[in-house]
Image (cartoon, grey):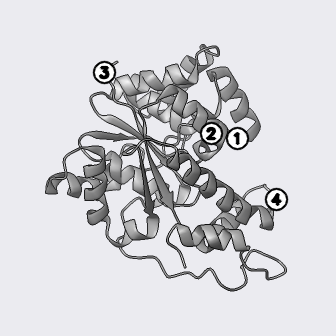
Amino acid sequence: MTGAAPVFVLCPARSFSSVVSCCLGEHPALYGLPEMYLFVADTVGELIGKAALRGPFMLHGLLRVLAELREGGQSEAGVEAARAWLAARPDMGTAALYREVVEMVAPRTCVDKTPSYAFPRNLRRLIAAWPDARFLHLGRHPRPTGISLRNARSKGSRTVDAAEIERYWLRTHADLAEFGAGLPPGRYMYLRGEAFLAEPRLWLGQIAEWLGISGAPEAIEAMCHPETSPYARPGPANAPYGHNPGFLEDPTLRIGAPSPASLAGPLDWMPDGDGFAANTISLARRLGYR
């Protein structure tokens, strides 16, 4: 293989991962991927089956990547050709398909931000396929994360389970912190998303140093323009997504610290006005939140 092991951005949904991964992907040595979902299944056929149950959006990022890299562009025809190519390979391992993508973008290194990868069973697939991968654990304060999740879920057909919103944040970050603690030095980095947005050039330079790639001013400047990614705008009508829809509508980097949030007080999405549980507050403080 000529392709380097990927960089995975790991976090719960609604945690700035679209903008962070697209920023990283504009470095000359990196290639930012949309949400690929490949490691939620063992085979292509299993992945297609899960998409049939959970929603076709799961395949949009992968179809856009295959259309871009194999079919010469993200047209509707290119997406349909990519879909037919996938359908003809139900027994192909998802790890093998990922390796093909890595080879196609070599010598650039892939950056992937699929939130579902943060579940332990999917992390095990990642490590089995890419034992030398590096992992950027991205944080966001649990209060704005919860509000964003509630708003996103209330727009769709899913029932909003208010208590599950907090459990999801806690479970995901606890699993990622434990996962990172078990990795060799240099393979894991934790970053608060709010700190990144407040000083992106500072943190992009530190991430470049961590990855061992150029931190030259022109490379940092390129990373400050996520809108130049081929996946930073809506795709064709048959595969429009692959990133957060709000990001796709305006994929520019808006520099500035988000409004401060507190761990104290009632939660907007809890009908009885409860606040955060003690274990959520404890972990959030460990991750740098107050």
Q: Does 224 appear above or below 119?
A: below
Image location (x, y in percent) of residue 202: 27, 65
Mark 3 against mark 2, which lies toward the viewer?
A: 3
All told, the count of numbered labels is: 4
Image location (x, y in percent) of residue 280: 67, 69
Q: Secondary structure at mark 2?
A: helix
Q: Earlier in the sequence, mark 1 or mark 4?
A: 1
Q: Which residue is mark 4?
A: 159
Name the image quarter holding residue 254.
bottom left
Mark 2 to mark 1: distance in Å?
6 Å
Res 141 seen here: no
In the picture provided, is 239 more to the left or to the right than 188?
right
Image location (x, y in percent) of residue 101: 42, 26
Q: Which residue is mark 3?
A: 2
Mark 3 to mark 2: distance in Å?
28 Å
Q: Which residue is mark 2?
A: 58
Mark 4 against mark 3, which lies toward the viewer?
A: 3
Classify 10 Å Cα crowding around label 3: few (below 14), some (14-19), many (20 and above): few
